[in-house]
Image (cartoon, rainbow, N blue to C red):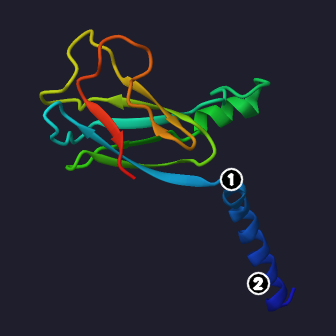
Amino acid sequence: MTYPARMLRALLLFSLLLLPGCISGATRSVTMRVTAPDGSPVPNAQVYAVVLGRSPVPLPIDAETISEVLTKESISGWTDSDGEVRLELDEDEGHVIFLRPPPVGPYALGPGEAGAYRYLLDAGEGLRADPVGGGEPPLLKLETVR
């Protein structure tokens, strides 16, 4: 095999490896801010998203779909010192956004307290101000920044 043919074959194989990333849907960058009741930023809170309208377990259940679920990366992040986190979300999908308070500090959850607050992020409209599921209003505030 000649040098140009080997290079062409290597280039073709490399491009096939990149193809799955190119096929995936468009994403949008969403920055959210977590603040305390006094308006101060809350660092080290976890914010994660789950796409609405998609089952976390694809059907039919077989070895391939179970492997897909187990290797699926979650969309999550931790707030920085300004209380902000940026997530790359599917552009055309709504999401349930979960806010988990920092593990330590004045807003940390005590034993037996609920684990996370849930919010809705629509595909085009933005974050709903009210948490999903009723109950007491959350101590921490979550809002979209940009």
Q: Circle 1 — which element?
A: loop
Residue at 59% x, 33% y is 70
Indicate which disc, 2 or 1, sits on the residue closer to the N terminus: 2
Q: Residue 127, image x and y in percent?
A: 44, 37
Q: Which residue is mark 1?
A: 24
146 lies left or right of 26: left
99 lies left or right of 83: right
Give 88 or 18, whichever is nearer the viewer: 88
Q: Residue 15, image x and y in percent?
A: 73, 70
Q: Which residue is mark 2?
A: 7
Residue at 72% x, 32% y is 65
Give 5 or 97, whichever is nearer the viewer: 97
| Residue 92, label in figure | none
- Mark in the foreground, 2 or 1: 1
Residue farthest toward the front in the current orientation of the protein: 125
Residue at 28% x, 36% y is 45
Q: Residues within 10 Å of mark 1 (few under 14, many from 20)?
A: few
Residue farthest toward the right in the current orientation of the protein: 1
Q: Residue 60, image x and y in percent?
A: 79, 24
Distance in Å between CA atoms under marks 2 and 1: 27 Å
Three-letter amino acid code of the residue under disc 1: Ser
Residue at 15% x, 41% y is 40
131 lies left or right of 34: right
Q: Circle 2 — which element?
A: helix
In the displayed structure, 120 sits above or below 90; it is above
